Every structure is written in C-alpha cells, then in structure tokens.
Image: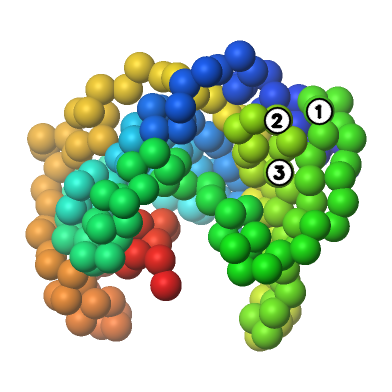
Amino acid sequence: MRRFFILMLAVAAGVAAAPAPASETWYAERITAGDTPLRVEHFWSKGRQVRMETVIRSQPLITLVKGELYTVIDPVKRRGIAIRRAPGAVRYDREHPDERPFASDAALIIAEGAEKVGTEETPGGSSTHYRLSDRRGRREVWMTNSEPSLPLRVIRYDRTTAGTVRQDFVDWARELDLPDRFFEPDPDITLEQLDYAEYLRRAGDESSYLLPVLMRELLHGRS
C-alpha cells in the first residue's frame, strides 16, 4: 500500500487548484501490469481529442483520436493506419463534449451497479473503493474524493482466464497548453486509410498490417 499512498500524493498535487473544466485539457500517466505485458501509457486530451503514447515490450505506439479518425502509428517505422470511426463513437463525442475521453472506469462500473466498498485515508487525501462482480469477473476502482474525482487504481479479474490486470495512475495534470496539431500525425508518417467496415474485415486476418487498438471504445463506441 505504500506505493499507493505515494500515487495518491502525486495525483493530489497534480490537480490541486486547477479550476479548468473537464472539456479543456488533461494529462495522465498510467502503468499496467499483472497477467499482461507491462505497459506504460501517457494520455493527453483537449476536449474529445486524444493523444496516447504507449510502450509495450519496448515497442512504442502513438494513438490519435480526432474527429472522425482513429489513427495508430508505429513511430519507429514511421507508418500507421487511419481508421474512420464507428458512427456511434463520433455521435458520443458530439453528445458529451465536456466529458474527459479517457479514464472513465469508475463512471462505467458505477453505471453498471458497482457497490461502494469503503473509504480509505491516504496522505494525499481520501479515496473511495468501488467493486463490481458479474459473470465476466470482478472490476475494482479507487477514486479520489477530491473534485474532480479521478481514478487512482483499477484492478480487473477475468473469470475465464483467471488473470488479473492492475492499472495505476501515477500522475494527473490539467489546464495545459496543447495546440490542435499535437493531436495530428506528423506529415512524414505514411498512413493507410481504412473505413470502419474494412477495418473490421481485416481485423480477423492475421496477415493484414494492423497495429493494436488500445482505446477500443473511442473507435467502436460504447456498447
């Protein structure tokens, strides 16, 4: 728990006295570990625009979400794919312009009926622990009790695989100066353009050149 306390302190310091609405700009760093390859992720958002930089087993990836396009880039090979997003995903952006487009874990499980396990006091403030168990497994999330409430840790247990994945948010910040071009690919990147139906067709073909989709709800929409 000592590391968890340190995370709480860093998060509290990163968002203290930040009056900007959620529709402005956000940054977060997240570490994913457990029964999955270690993953280090950096998120930035401006309104519903997203930039995500990820390293998985030394492989860097850049994910960009802006308007109707979901773009995944291999920055080493300087190539990628630009997929036209599902209509439902684009419609969700229009209907929720002020909602932060990443790290919505608590809102999702609470909407599905998660129970409040309790409140935990930490050096950076207090957090609330929520849990949801269903046929798929168990999901837990710890949220700060400050305003705005932010996720600190997410744990998922899958009944089918008996695997557990833990995600820790180690930094949060907001009210950043992010130009729109930050959410666009560099001009020297070679991009293959795909419409949504073509992407779905090729996703099942192992011989196709497709990079991982890491924020699936921003491509496919919420089910």
Question: Mark 2 to mark 1: distance in Å?
Answer: 8 Å
Q: Quadrant of the N terminus?
A: top right
Is 150 on the left-hand or right-hand side of 120?
Answer: left
Give the quarter of the image for residue 169: top right
Q: How crowded is mark 1: few (under 14 residues within 10 Å), some or many (20 or more)?
A: some
Q: Do the CB atoms of the residues marked 2 and 1 lie less than 8 Å apart?
A: yes
Please say if 145 is above or below 74: above
What residue sits right under mark 1 in the picture? Answer: 125
Give the quarter of the image for residue 215: bottom left
Question: Mark 1 to mark 3: distance in Å?
Answer: 11 Å
Please say if 218 is above or below 77: below
Name the N-terminal-most of marks 1 and 3: 1
What residue sits right under mark 2 in the picture? Answer: 146
Q: Position of residue 164 (x, y in %)?
A: 71, 67
Q: Which of 103 and 39 is in front in this view?
A: 103
Q: What residue type is labelled 1?
A: Gly
The circle drawn on residue 143 is 3
